[in-house]
Amino acid sequence: MNAELLAMLGGSMPGASSRRENEPKTILSFKAGKMIAERQPSGKYMVTPDQRRGTLEVNWTASSSSSSAGVLKLEWKDRRTRAVVETFPIFPEDDCTYSKVDTGPGREKDRVYLLQYGNASERRIFFWMQEKEEGNQDEEFCIKINTFMADPEEAAAAATGKPKKEKTESKKKSEKSSDADASTGQIQSSELQAIMQGLNTSAGGEGNAAPSPGQVDALSSILGNLGIPQNTNASASTASGNTDDATAPAGSGGLTLSDLQGAMAGLATTSPTSAASASIQAPGPNLADVATSENVIESGILENEEVKQKLIELLPENQRTEEHLMENLRSPQVRQCLASLSAALCDEGMDGFNSILANFSLRPEDGAIAMMSGNPIQAFLDCVLKSVQREKEEEGKNDDAEMK
Amino acid sequence: MSSNWCTIESDPAVFSSLIESFGVKNAQLTELYSLDEGTLLSLNESYGKIHGLVFLFKWQGNEATDETDRVSDEDAPEDLFFSRQMITNACATQALLSILLNAKATDDGSDEDNTGAVSLGEILSTLKSFTASFPPDLKGEAIGASDEIREAHNSFARKEAFLVDENKKRIATKDDEVFHFIAYVPHSNGIVYELDGLQNGPINVGSFDNTMELDNGMGDLPWLTVACAAIQKRIEKYQSSEIKFNLMALTQDRRNYIQSKIKAMLEAGLSESDEAISALNMDLMHEEEQRKQWEIENERRRHNYLPFCMELIRALAKSGNLQECTRKAREKTNASGYRGI
């Protein structure tokens, strides 16, 4: 529910208004996937990765009134369809932060980032990195995004060179909010209150009623056209609290975006638990670390004659002895092969993964769960486990058949 | 010349086997861990004949600007074999050929006078005479066009190539390690030349006294000293950065050298049981052992381990140990910090 609303609110702005603005300029972009936060009956949120390959873009659209004013949007695009799936408008007063998520002990390899709206907002979006990190890339993106979000002038500077378009409609709009500060086009919170109240009434009161699509669109368009910093006050209260503030003077006790959202959808105030509950897994581990000679010895599989013989048969022609078996297990060549296998499984585009599975008669559906969590190596291991299980069952059946 | 040349591992076992696959006899590679006099003396002593040095270092794209002071020798002798490198991945083979085709060689494998001459074999002898009058770039083209040489080179290709789609191979960026090989050879005119396929011609790095006879024990020390001084200068240039480099010597096959020494001693009247001869026999045994080990390693390099690895993983799965091994692996990775795949 929460996710749907966020998506609707963040969704593409009504065509008319966006066309009036100047063209957006992408000032940062990298490959990332988004994540789905689902509210559980317990009230906690379960965060799972959306497996679609995507791009996170930071776009700056300057307003025609001033080159340093404009809208910053984070947009998530589906790389396959090339469509923008989600848009998050960000204003400095939102106090948004973009930071790395600690997904818990043993999960240091996760590259999960969180875009969190500040002021005790419920609004948060998780992303997971989809491109191989070069140097300190992740960290650098983090710094850049936070900079752009906090300081529109930085974003504007990053987008310099962009031509401006004079549009009469946008001029009209800034004239409309005449009691607003002309340079920033600020709307009084009282105006916003009034709009919201109107919407609220038609929604049939505060709280748990789902907003009708029409209302959300209206709100979306208001938010979209705002393109301005908002007065904010930390307040996670529900609608009733907001209506009390209606008569407060501008500049104090203003509305927060989260208040609006809360009013519209009656969002639960229970915060999702930390991403430690996330079901995503880090891709890995490297198979060369799984099948080390120590692990193999400890597992005792070499005490099984059949296993030993099978392995010996697969050694280089002149090394098919027990003695050479151990040397080979420890050899850099075996380690390299396992590492290459791991890399091929994780190779973007799935070709490596699919061809390996095909080559060894493994069924992709056996590893579907791990695949969806973004871990092709675990998926591969799951496929092997299932395949081996089936083999055992077959052998069991055959034994039974023979006994009869 | 669009046929593919693969990258190969730089290791004496690989290179020795590589040149053998070209048809070369009585030659091998050995690794040098230091440039000091002691090492050179020992090298001389152990191998008898050193044909050239191969210096391997990390190639910096902007090297060209540093090299303006190093003019290639326009007056380089006609009979000095120098070829321009035409193919990136072939640079190891290129360096080895630079030495082999300049080395004291025999065609028929005979070395009656125990000079340590290398036996080039048919492929390389033909290449040498065929390209004798070619300019450097044409010499390079000829090497690149040789099917036998390319096939031999590729048979030592790094095995991971097969798992990754050809088209998806990453293009080397400045952060990738691209290694470059340079050869140092002595010439009969008493000059040591640096042969770098990416330069326009051979580079004179110093002269040495080549009038010494083989028997006085100095052997190749004079020219080696000059070559090492040049290499030392290079190393110093890279001192500030974390440069990896390797140094190998292309020498006579040590087993042959030892055998010729034993033969000489027997002819001089020593008996088989003589201490000196026993010691040499021990050395010979040691060399043979090493060759056997090299062959095993090379066999592993050529082997496709994928079925073996799959069977290993299946066996772990079947015995119920896979989860445990995976858990241990994760722990290990986390303990040692992020390690990308």
Image: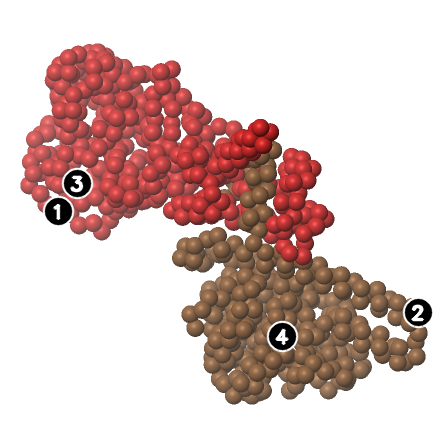
Chain colours: A red, B brown
Pointer 1 or 3: first along the chain: 3
Q: Which residue is mark 1?
A: A165
Q: Amino acid at mark 3?
A: Ser
Marks 2 and 3 sit apart, C-alpha to C-alpha, by 98 Å
| Pointers 4 and 1 within a single chain | no
**Marks 2 and 3: which is nearer the front?**
2
Q: Amino acid at mark 2?
A: Ser
Q: Residue B177: image x %, image y %? A: 51, 58
Dot 4 falls on which chain?
B
Marks 1 and 3 sit apart, C-alpha to C-alpha, by 9 Å
Instruction: Name the one closer to the observer, A401 or A243.
Output: A401
| Pointers 2 and 3 within a single chain | no
**Marks 4 and 3: which is nearer the front?**
4
Q: Residue B27: image x %, image y %? A: 68, 73
Does the image show residue A392? no
Q: Are marks 4 and 1 in contact (CB under 8 Å)?
A: no
Q: Is residue B273 above or below residue A360?
A: below
Dot 1 crowding, Cα within 10 Å, few <14, some 14–19, many 20+: some
The disc label shown at residue B273, or none: 2
Q: Which residue is mark 4?
A: B23
The disc label shown at residue A63, or none: 3
